[in-house]
Image (cartoon, rainbow, N blue to C red):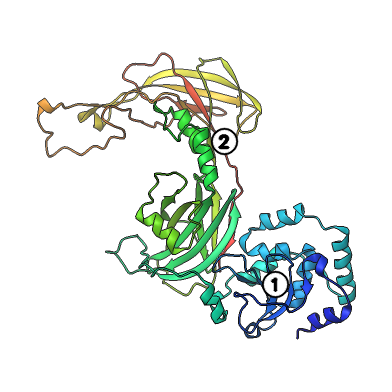
Amino acid sequence: MDEMYARLLSSGIDPSPVGFTIGEGARYFCTPADASILGWAGVDGIHFIQIPAFGDTVFAVSPMNGYPDFVHPVAADFTGFLRLLAACFDTAAIEQAWQWDRDKFYGFLGENAPDEEQIETIGALCEKLGIEPMDEPYEYITSIQNGFDYGAIEYTPEFFDALPEQAPEEEWPVYFEGNRERGEPGAELPLNKSFTWAGHDWLMPSAYVCHEGLVLDILYRTPSEDMVEFAIEHHLWPEPPEESLTPEQREAIEAEHPMNLDFRPSVTVNGCEIRDFSGSSRVYAPCFPDYEPDRDARRFVERYGLDQDACWTCWRYSFPWPEGAEVQEIRSLEVHLEAAPVRVPGPVFSAGAGEDVAFTNPVTGAEHTLHVEESETEELPESGLQEFSQLPRWCRTLEYSISPDIPVECISIRDAHPGDPVRPKYSPADGPVSQDAACIGVIGGSDGPTSVIVGAPARDGLRAAVSSLYFAPPDLVEWRMCFYDKRHDDICIRLI
């Protein structure tokens, strides 16, 4: 018996007010074989155990969790467990820490302040047993759980009998470039890392170690009711809009779409950061009656045992090994998610040189004034592309300042209209273009606009914008402000 546990038994202290009732009690199907039960949380059958094969480590057993998340280590020994209790005032946060990030963990503690009885109980434990509260409880728990080999836990036959029957597992080879014809499939590295970020529940179930680099699956969950509410609010369902959406409407929808989270991942493997990546995604959205998932989306859901009633965005990222690096054992692995700013449409305006435009920043609510210093019409020089297409060459430039200032990365100004489309220079009657001619790719449909982006330098202290391109000099341009709102802090997750 653990020495500190024996001291607790002889102390006469009843720790049940802090979610730990001493006693062996009945065992559950998911209680590991040979486990010694230390005590119970008093809700959902949650109990705390030690397993001889793992020495003094204390585990939380949660029968109401889904497979395979029934058992998690929470402390290196019972002294560490009591110190966690002294810091958290209840076992609830300790038991749930495996599925939370740092903010969610400490946010839970802040929202669930201890009552008088809990404070008295923890005071008695500290005084009689000579313990002190854990300084950083979340960091301590994650240090115990990161890299833990859950496959080493032995269960009773009842455990496997209680699991739902699984269909034969479909082949799941994962290639670095997603192509069976190139390279060899990677070796799976189970992670089973869950956390909460940006208002969603996230899962990183596995990584795959390939000769060319590391493949990492990153998934996040969206409640189906959130998707339905969003579709109804924006008149996208049950009947789609009869007219085409304006660019402003599309940007507003993209900014509020509950499944549209833009982020940039990077990984650190054995202390070496890898920022280069390529990625692809699949969407699983069963909330609409006629929805039929594609094969890859269905395979993600089935392979990783995801909640099939919820919506999922499934990203697969490939990170190439640094040049000259060899495939090696992965001793440590972290992933950093950088939240991308959301584009928020702003007001449209027209103004000439010397005029002011007052506006409200929709992100901050602050009042600003844009002052137009210069606004001129310019013709761009001809380019080699003129041989094959008629290109619009007229634009309008804008030099301006903003007060109070707004950081340049938080606002942009562009033409509110797409400009004139490129016109083909050869008609079918002209016959085929010479085989010696270059092949020119045009962005946009045959009758739609083509966007041409032109950069313009600005004078000191001023900013510059350039309109879309037109075949005739534009006398008046309507400019549209666009704001960028970074709504979430970046996050770093230790996987191994």
**Residue under label 1:** 47
In terms of image quadrants, where is residue 423?
top left
For the point 39% across and 60% down, the residue is 299
SS of the residue under disc 1: strand
For the point 41% across and 52% down, the residue is 282
Residue 219 position within the rendered picture, expressed as x and y whole percent measured from the top left? 49, 56
Tags 2 and 1 touching, CB below 8 Å: no
Inspect this view and state whether residue 133 appears. Answer: no
**Residue under label 2:** 410
Amino acid type of the residue that numbered disc 2 sits on in the rendered structure: Cys
| Image: 156 above or below 258 | below
| Image: 186 above or below 309 | below
Residue 36 position within the rendered picture, expressed as x and y whole percent measured from the top left? 69, 82
Q: State how far apart marks 2 and 1 are (Cα).
A: 50 Å
Of the 4 image quadrants, the one containing the N terminus is: bottom right
For the point 49% across and 72% down, the residue is 330
Amino acid type of the residue that numbered disc 1 sits on in the rendered structure: His
